[in-house]
């Protein structure tokens, strides 16, 4: 498991792409503090127990990233590609489920207008979902219940 500090690129990408802010960010702030990082905003974020106002928490996360010296990716495309590489590494290390990673990347794909570099993850999400729910799918040629995990892993492996 990477340290919280090693996860900074992941959290910058998530924030830049406008992914939902939830307790994951609070847990990350607590881990940063345990690792010895300390800023005013980091203490405030780590102390949140039930983030209610996503705008306020979002501003707080932005301040934490700024105080830690993080920089934004040069574009949303660069942030999305960084997130794909991070999720690919996590999926292949079994630290995140295929479905969770595909769900997140499917949403980013939709939000960014279905760019080619994300579209395979959109299709694979629906292929996996249909295979789990219906036993068949028409999104990814040749994928079935016996090989869908290998197909997904191969696509993620291309990003590592």
Image (tube, helix red, strand yellow):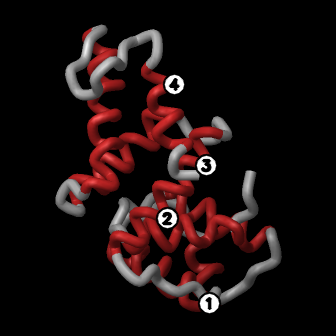
- Residue 71 appears in the rendering: yes
For disc 2, the marked residue is: 82
Sequence-wise, the earlier of marks 1 and 3 is: 1
Disc 4 to disc 2, how far (Cα)? 22 Å
State left or right for residue 82 relative to residue 107. Answer: right
Mark positioned earlier in the residue sequence (2 or 1): 1
Q: Position of residue 119 (x, y in %)?
A: 28, 47
Of the residues under marks 4 and 2, which one precedes in the sequence? 2
User: What residue is drawn where x is 49% and y is 24%?
Assistant: 149
Residue at point 43%, 74% (across, down): 57
Q: Which residue is mark 3?
A: 89
Q: Which element is circle 3 on?
A: helix
Q: Residue 47: image x %, image y %?
A: 61, 71
Q: Which residue is mark 4?
A: 150
Query: In the rendered structure, which disc, 2 or 3, sits on the residue that comes first in sequence?
Result: 2
The answer to whether 12 appears left or right of 75 in the picture is right
Query: x, y percentage for residue 106?
Result: 31, 46
């Amino acid at each position: 498991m990477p340290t919280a500090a090693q996860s900074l690129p992941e959290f910058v990408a998530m924030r830049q792409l406008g992914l939902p802010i939830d307790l994951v960010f609070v847990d990350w702030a607590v881990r940063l503090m345990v690792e010895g990082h300390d800023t005013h905003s980091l203490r405030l974020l780590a102390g949140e127990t039930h983030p209610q106002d996503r705008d306020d928490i979002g501003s707080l996360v932005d301040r934490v990233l700024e105080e830690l010296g993080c920089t934004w990716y040069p574009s949303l495309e660069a942030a999305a590609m960084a997130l794909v590489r991070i999720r690919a590494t996590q999926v292949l290390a079994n630290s995140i489920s295929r479905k969770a990673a595909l769900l997140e990347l499917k949403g980013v794909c939709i939000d960014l207008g279905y760019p080619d570099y994300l579209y395979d993850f959109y299709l694979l999400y629906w292929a996996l979902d249909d295979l789990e729910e219906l036993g068949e799918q028409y999104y990814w040629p040749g994928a079935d219940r016996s090989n869908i995990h290998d197909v997904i892993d191969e696509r993620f492996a291309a990003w590592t």
